[in-house]
Image: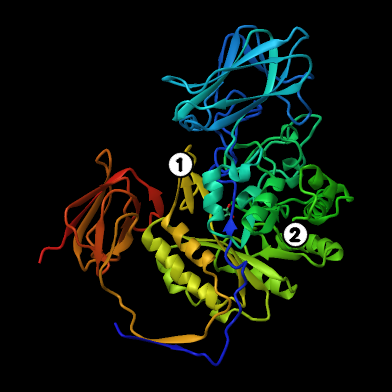
């Protein structure tokens, strides 16, 4: 096709802020424990509890030998860390880490620590790191003596394994808690640090901002505080004060996404990670109205007041002088200098716009009264349009809110068709924070549709000030949501095609938009080839029959293309598709483990075989 692109050098377009493209980190898909947080021991403090109907117990991920049991009594480590393990003489306990096990690499150092309590004569503890084939490092010995104290040792791995186990055996009666193993080689070499490969993949994006810690994780569950008297307040919303200070004093939580959080990766670590990556920190606090399918407004003025105060304290924790109460806590954790918080979001995807906004206003008024320098971000609910969206925008606009968060997960086609979404947004405000978006897949075609859409964001950089693909991370063994930007297992990680799109934009953010106009007919056909993750539309032009059957031979879907289209995407690493005129050119192809959208069934995972027959003639 012929194009003409006219660039208007006489005018300047909107400026593009360096912070425009950032990342949205949510602790979903085990993004923290078993993900970015480098701790290798799962359930290190024996606090796991059932979450989301899964059968978690205080001994999840542990095997015991001999007389070993979890105890919850007055002999505990502290009031926020209730359970501990007792071992009788000659007993042992073994942790199997996450998924396949503890991943270690030959020659690398691993730092072990434990809190232990025993009688005066002491308890010699033997620590071994091993897998089914034998030892992975020389065994270590420590002797615990007296009341609760911390003991440390380090291993150097003599073999590489992704299926390691850590065993602690005791020759005398002992109580144990916080059994921990970290790779020495964390991101930036920090203690209690981040998994290096994942942190480096995020840092390589050069994100303009880091939105954390969720999502639905933030505002779902109980808004009550952890109760030190009874021990538990299960399924709490994300309350930042739970997540700072010494790790053994951070009360764990079972969360909306169906697993337990240690909070070893908490607000201090998020701020530090933002600083390390040069990203503007952008925390989200609960607004006491639950979205994410729960649609509940908490009607408790005292509780609201406490959360508003917590938010003011958060600003002090991030920015306050070391002489202030919360600034002092930051300094004690190792960061006397302020973190430079400038933006903060209240609420996430509330489906009850009026109830949300009534509470949002209270947060905003209190923050603006004490910290007029902070931009308080609101949101527009869970959809890209519709009555909730319209109502939320109207409330935000009427109250002169500075910035509104929008979220949408739509088809690639939607992204291609909505490049002009922001062309007509009111320039008088509020500004837009596109806090979550993704086309529904991790294929090359999805990434391309997002790139096309992002050119529209950029063209409207005077209105769209911040944008982040979502979610960021997924452990492939705990997937609650997909697609995601970066995937990983215990010892490897890989960026999706969408990651490459984000990287391209984040690392090459322009200074300003150059006004331009293109004329001509865009190409609608022409060969596109790719090796992995290629997605396209199969149309009646090339095929007259497509059928999809499950691995067990059960028919799932077939389409003769007499009406409408079908689409599918090929799983990574399964060979090459070639695509022409919007359809696959191979005939009689069979692919396995493919993600398919079939008719109106929505996105679903199938272990399946796809057979597409090329139209004869
Ligand atoms: O990004 C995953 C989820 O999508 C987030 O938790 C929520 O905000 C949205 O619905």
The extreme right residue here reads: 323
The extreme front residue here reads: 107
The extreme left residue here reads: 617
- For ligand 1, give the image quadrant: bottom right
Percent x, y for residue 531?
30, 56
Q: Quadrant of residue 468?
A: bottom right
On the question of residue 42 being in view, the answer is: no
Q: Quadrant of residue 546?
A: bottom left
Q: Which residue is mark 2?
A: 340
Q: Quadrant of the C terminus?
A: bottom left
Q: Residue at x 53, y 65 (%)?
A: 507
Q: Residue at x 59, y 13 (%)?
A: 92
**Left or right side of 106 for 561:** left
On the question of residue 614 being in view, the answer is: yes
Percent x, y for residue 299?
78, 51
Q: Earlier in the sequence, mark 1 or mark 2?
A: 2
Q: Residues within 10 Å of mark 1 (few under 14, many from 20)?
A: few
Tag count: 2
Q: Which residue is mark 1?
A: 492
Percent x, y for residue 183?
57, 34
Percent x, y for residue 287?
72, 55
Q: CA distance from mark 1 to mark 2?
A: 33 Å
């Amino acid at each position: 096709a012929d194009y003409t692109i006219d660039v208007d050098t006489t005018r300047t377009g909107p400026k593009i802020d360096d912070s425009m493209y950032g990342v949205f980190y949510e602790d979903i898909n085990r993004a923290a424990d078993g993900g970015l947080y480098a701790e290798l021991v799962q359930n290190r403090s024996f606090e796991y509890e059932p979450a989301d109907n899964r059968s978690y117990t205080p001994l999840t991920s542990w095997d015991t030998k001999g007389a070993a049991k979890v105890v919850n009594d007055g002999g505990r480590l502290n009031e926020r860390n209730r359970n501990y393990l007792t071992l009788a003489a000659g007993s042992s306990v073994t942790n199997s880490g996450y998924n396949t096990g503890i991943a270690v690499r030959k020659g690398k150092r691993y730092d072990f620590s434990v809190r232990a309590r025993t009688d005066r004569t002491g308890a010699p503890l033997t620590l071994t790191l091993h897998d089914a084939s034998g030892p992975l490092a020389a065994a270590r010995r420590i002797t615990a003596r007296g009341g609760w104290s911390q003991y440390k040792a380090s291993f150097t791995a003599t073999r590489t394994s992704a299926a390691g186990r850590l065993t602690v055996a005791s020759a005398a009666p002992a109580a144990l808690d916080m059994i921990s193993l970290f790779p020495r080689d964390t991101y930036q070499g920090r203690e209690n640090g981040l998994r290096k490969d994942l942190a480096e993949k995020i840092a390589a994006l050069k994100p303009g901002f880091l939105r954390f810690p969720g999502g639905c994780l933030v505002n779902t569950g109980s808004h009550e505080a952890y109760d030190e008297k009874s021990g538990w307040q299960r399924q709490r919303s994300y309350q930042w004060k739970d997540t700072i200070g010494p790790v053994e004093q951070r009360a764990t939580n079972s969360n909306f996404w169906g697993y337990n959080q240690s909070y070893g990766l908490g607000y201090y670590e998020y701020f530090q990670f933002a600083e390390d990556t040069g990203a503007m920190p952008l925390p989200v606090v609960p607004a006491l109205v639950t979205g994410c399918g729960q649609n509940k407004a908490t009607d408790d003025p005292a509780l609201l007041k406490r959360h508003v105060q917590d938010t003011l304290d958060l600003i002090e924790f991030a920015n306050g002088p070391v002489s202030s109460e919360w600034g002092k806590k930051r300094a004690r954790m190792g960061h006397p200098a302020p973190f430079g918080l400038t933006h903060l979001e209240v609420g996430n995807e509330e489906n009850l716009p009026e109830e949300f906004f009534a509470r949002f206003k209270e947060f905003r008024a209190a923050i603006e009264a004490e910290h007029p320098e902070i931009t308080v971000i609101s949101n527009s609910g869970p959809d890209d349009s519709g009555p909730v969206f319209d109502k939320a925008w109207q409330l935000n606009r009427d109250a002169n809110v500075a910035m509104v968060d929008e979220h949408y997960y739509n088809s690639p086609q939607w992204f291609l068709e909505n490049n002009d979404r922001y062309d007509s947004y009111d320039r008088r405000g509020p500004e837009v924070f596109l806090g979550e978006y993704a086309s529904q897949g991790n294929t090359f075609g999805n990434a391309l549709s997002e790139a096309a859409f992002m050119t529209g964001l950029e063209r409207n950089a005077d209105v769209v000030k911040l944008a982040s693909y979502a979610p960021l991370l997924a452990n492939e063994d705990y997937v609650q949501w997909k697609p995601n930007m970066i995937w990983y297992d215990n010892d490897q990680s890989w960026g999706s095609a969408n990651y490459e799109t984000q990287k391209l934009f984040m690392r090459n953010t322009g200074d300003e938009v150059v006004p331009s106009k293109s004329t001509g007919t865009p190409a609608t056909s022409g060969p596109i080839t790719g090796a992995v993750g290629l997605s396209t539309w199969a149309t009646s032009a090339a095929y007259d029959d497509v059928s999809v059957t499950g691995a067990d031979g059960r028919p799932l879907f077939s389409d003769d293309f007499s009406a409408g289209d079908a689409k599918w995407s090929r799983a990574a690493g399964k060979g090459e598709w070639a695509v022409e005129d919007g359809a696959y050119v191979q005939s009689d192809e069979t692919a396995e483990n493919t993600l398919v959208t079939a008719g109106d069934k929505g996105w679903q995972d199938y272990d399946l075989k796809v057979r597409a027959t090329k139209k004869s003639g």
